[in-house]
């Protein structure tokens, strides 16, 4: 209920002077598919226009459905996919000088290898041992995955944070939203303290937004130019270039994080005036979301493919 849909366009049913019979027109109308609505969700920010409205056409959703169904991703548990991805990750030194640190990263080559392992774990096979994906599906899935990698590679250095990518990738997998959120929370808690500081929560939410915004904008998926659009909340159309997508992700995750921390810890969180802490645990986040936070970040509902991509799959 937190994801709005556009209303079907009204059609003009007046007869037109064409050289075909009325019966032909009636048959055409009888077999024409009914108008379908695009999926829309808002992504609020602290900008003057208050945020963005992202629209994803049914044409794009159905193409994504084809990819996750033929590849078997929709049946693969997110934690299994994460394991396959992290198997290929390498701990590398990041930064320089006193600010240097080590992090699990993936190069494009390592990412491609990880994706082959993920798909091998999920692809259904026929009785003759043949892969269930057509070449067309393989091509489009590969392009979509590349666009996701490129969005995570925000500094264009050829490497991405493996933990963030693994968490975001669960969007394409089977499983409940709550399970994905809890697993990703634990995975990104590298120090295993059981809680997040402000920057940790931004990183957490960004990982999902990168994949969702890649889906909404990638050229690898079928597009409806009238419906696959992003506007500001005041109705101004935005482009979907890389810099725009990254800005939307950054502003959206930062705004949501502020909302979470102010609600859970109180407005003056930096002074440790409430509960003497400046961090939150997963239960804090889950309670905030359940008690109304879902109206602020409704896009988290999209972590469950059954609610949009697989909505009518039995």
Image (cartoon, rainbow, N blue to C red):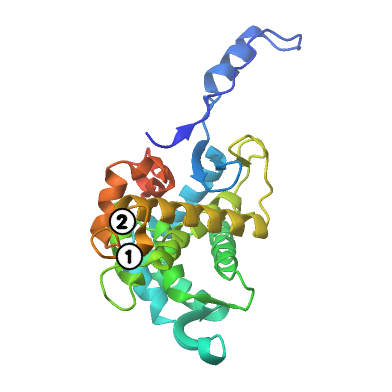
Residue 16 - label: none
The mark total stands at: 2
Q: CA distance from mark 1 to mark 2?
A: 7 Å
- Point out residue 124 in the picture as x, y percentages from the top left corner: 37, 61
Instruction: Determine whether 161 is above or below 264 in the image.
Output: below
Left of 118 or right of it: where is 108?
Answer: right
Question: What residue occupies the far bottom of the structure in this picture?
Answer: 97
The residue singled out by tag 1 in the image is: 278
Front in this rendered view, residue 99 or 228? 99
- Write down the quadrant of residue 170 in the picture: bottom left
- Point out residue 224 in the picture as x, y percentages from the top left corner: 63, 39
Instruction: Determine whether 155 is above or below 103 in the image.
Output: above
Q: Residue at x 47, y 61 (%)?
A: 206
Q: Residue at x 37, y 52 (%)?
A: 267
Q: Does residue 175 appear in the picture of this structure?
A: no
Instruction: Determine whether 26 is above or below 296 in the image.
Output: above
The residue singled out by tag 2 in the image is: 265
- Point out residue 211 in the picture as x, y percentages from the top left corner: 50, 58
Front in this rendered view, residue 22 or 68? 68
Q: Residue at x 66, y 35 (%)?
A: 226
- Write down the quadrant of residue 3 in the picture: top left
Q: In which quadrant of the rendered image does the N terminus lie? A: top left
Earlier in the chain: of badge 1 and badge 2, it is: 2
Left of 288 or right of it: where is 39?
Answer: right
Q: Residues within 10 Å of mark 1 (few under 14, many from 20)?
A: many
- C-beta proximity under 8 Å, tags 1 and 2: yes
């Amino acid at each position: 209920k937190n994801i709005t849909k556009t209303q079907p366009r009204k059609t003009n049913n007046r007869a037109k002077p064409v050289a075909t019979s009325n019966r032909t027109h009636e048959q055409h109308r009888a077999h024409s598919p009914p108008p379908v609505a695009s999926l829309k969700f808002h992504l609020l920010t602290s900008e003057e226009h208050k945020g963005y409205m992202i629209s994803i056409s049914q044409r794009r959703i159905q193409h994504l459905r084809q990819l996750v169904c033929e590849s078997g991703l929709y049946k693969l548990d997110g934690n299994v996919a994460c394991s396959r991805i992290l198997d290929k990750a390498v701990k590398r030194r990041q930064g320089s000088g006193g600010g240097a640190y080590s992090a699990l990263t993936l190069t494009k080559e390592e990412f491609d290898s990880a994706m082959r392992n993920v798909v091998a774990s999920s692809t259904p096979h026929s009785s003759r041992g043949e892969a269930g994906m057509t070449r067309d599906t393989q091509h489009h899935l590969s392009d979509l995955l590349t666009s996701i990698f490129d969005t995570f590679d925000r500094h264009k250095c050829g490497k991405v944070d493996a933990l963030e990518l693994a968490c975001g990738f669960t969007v394409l997998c089977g499983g409940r939203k709550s399970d994905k959120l809890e697993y990703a929370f634990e995975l990104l808690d590298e120090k295993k303290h059981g809680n997040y500081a402000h920057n940790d929560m931004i990183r957490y939410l960004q990982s999902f937004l990168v994949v969702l915004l890649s889906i909404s904008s990638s050229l690898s998926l079928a597009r409806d130019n009238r419906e696959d659009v992003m506007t500001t909340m005041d109705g101004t159309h935005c482009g979907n270039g890389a810099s725009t997508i990254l800005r939307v992700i950054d502003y959206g995750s930062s705004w949501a994080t502020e909302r979470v921390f102010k609600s859970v810890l109180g407005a003056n969180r930096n002074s440790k005036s409430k509960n003497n802490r400046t961090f939150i645990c997963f239960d804090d986040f889950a309670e905030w979301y359940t008690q109304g936070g879902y109206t602020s970040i409704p896009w988290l509902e999209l972590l469950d493919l059954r609610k949009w991509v697989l909505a009518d799959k039995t």
